[in-house]
Image: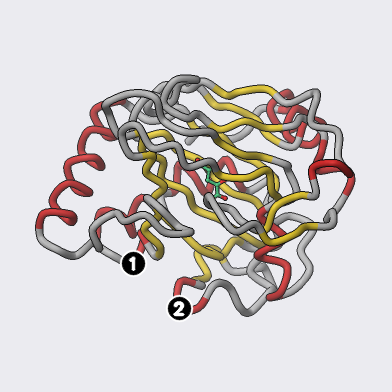
C-alpha cells in the first residue's frame, strides 16, 4: 500500500502541507457524495444553516459506517505514518460545504488555535479531501507555505464568517498565500499549525470537503467523543 515518498515527506516538513494527486478514484468520491446526500435526505445531517459554522457538519466520521470507514482507511493511515506518531488517533472530523453563492469566508487561522487545548502536539495535522472539484470560483482552500514553522500565533475572535479564531492579520505576512485548486479525489495533508483560509463560493454548485484531523495516540483526548485510537503507539 502507498506510503509517502521521501520527496513528499520533505515537502510536508518544509511547506507544512503536501498535495497527493489522484489519491482516491473519483468513483469513490461519488459514492461518498451519494452517502452524504442520503444522510441529508434522511435528516441524519442537520440542514445547512447560516451561522458561525455555515455549511459545517461536525462528527462526520461518526454518522455512518461509510464515513467512519473513510476516516480510518488504511490507505490514509499508511501515508500518515511518517508524519503522525507514535500511533495515530482521530482528533475530529467534519464536512465543510460551501453553499452555492455563499459569501461566507473561513478566516485565516491555524487549526491548533482550536485543538491545542487538549494537549500540545508536534505532529497534529489534517487531511482535506475535496469531494467535489475545489476551484478559485467555488472557494478552494488557501495556504501560506512554511507558516507552520512559526508555531502558534496570536488569534482573535471574529464575529462573522467561519473559522473565527482568526490570525491577527496585521501581525502576519499573508503575501505568500497560494490557492490549492484540487480535483475530487486529491488529498491534502497539512499541519495543524499551517495558516489557511477559504473564500466564498461564486458558483451555483456546492463545494464539499471531508476533513479529518489526526494526532499521536499518546494524547488521550480529542474533540469529545470523536477521539479514537486507530493505530496504538508501540509499547
Ligand atoms: O474547507 C474549508 O473551506 C476550510 C475549512 C477549515 O479550514 C477548517 O474548518 O479548519
Q: Quick one: SS at disc 2?
A: helix
> For this view, does 120 lie left or right of residue 179?
right
| Residue sitting at x 66%, y 54% | 111
Q: Is residue 82 left or right of residue 57?
A: right
Judge by depth and name the residue closer to the eye, 172 or 50: 50
Quick one: SS at disc 1?
A: helix
* Outermost residue to the left: 42
Task: Measuring from the top left, give residue 115's x and y in whole percent.
Answer: 66, 65
> Quick check: is the Cβ at mark 1 less than 8 Å away from ligand 1?
no
Q: Spatial distance from mark 1 to mark 2, Cα to Cα?
A: 9 Å
Look at the numbered discs 1 and 2 and tell me whether their residues touch, using CB distance below 8 Å.
Answer: yes
Give residue 108's position: percent from left, percent from top.
68, 43
Q: Which residue position is annotated with label 1?
A: 62
Of the 4 image quadrants, the one containing the C terminus is bottom right
The tag on residue 225 is 2
Taking the spot 13% from the left edge, 51% from the top edge, the residue there is 38
Spot occupied by residue 162 in the image (x, y as percentages of width and height): 53, 52
Q: Quadrant of residue 107?
A: top right
The residue located at (59%, 69%) in the rendering is: 232
Amino acid at each position: 500500500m502507498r506510503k509517502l515518498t521521501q520527496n513528499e515527506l520533505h515537502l510536508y516538513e518544509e511547506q507544512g502541507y503536501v498535495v497527493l494527486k489522484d489519491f482516491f478514484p473519483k468513483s469513490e468520491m461519488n459514492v461518498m457524495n451519494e452517502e452524504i446526500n442520503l444522510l441529508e435526505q434522511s435528516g441524519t445531517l442537520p440542514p445547512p444553516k447560516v451561522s458561525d459554522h455555515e455549511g459545517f457538519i461536525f462528527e462526520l466520521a461518526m454518522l455512518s459506517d461509510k464515513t467512519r470507514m473513510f476516516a480510518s482507511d488504511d490507505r490514509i493511515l499508511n501515508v500518515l505514518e511518517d508524519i503522525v506518531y507514535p500511533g495515530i488517533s482521530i482528533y475530529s472530523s467534519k464536512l465543510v460545504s460551501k453553499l452555492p453563492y455563499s459569501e461566507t469566508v473561513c478566516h485565516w487561522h491555524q487549526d491548533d488555535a482550536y485543538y491545542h487545548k487538549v494537549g500540545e502536539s508536534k505532529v497534529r495535522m489534517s487531511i482535506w479531501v475535496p469531494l467535489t472539484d475545489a476551484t478559485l470560483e467555488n472557494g478552494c482552500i488557501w495556504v501560506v507555505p512554511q507558516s507552520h514553522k512559526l508555531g502558534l500565533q496570536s488569534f482573535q475572535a471574529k464575529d462573522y464568517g467561519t473559522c473565527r479564531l482568526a490570525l491577527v492579520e496585521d501581525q502576519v505576512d499573508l503575501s505568500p498565500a497560494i490557492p490549492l485548486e484540487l480535483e475530487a479525489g486529491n488529498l491534502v495533508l497539512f499541519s495543524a499549525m499551517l495558516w489557511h483560509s477559504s473564500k466564498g463560493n461564486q458558483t451555483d454548485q456546492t463545494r464539499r470537503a471531508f476533513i479529518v484531523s489526526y494526532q499521536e495516540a499518546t494524547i488521550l483526548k480529542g474533540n469529545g467523543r470523536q477521539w479514537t485510537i486507530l493505530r496504538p503507539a508501540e509499547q
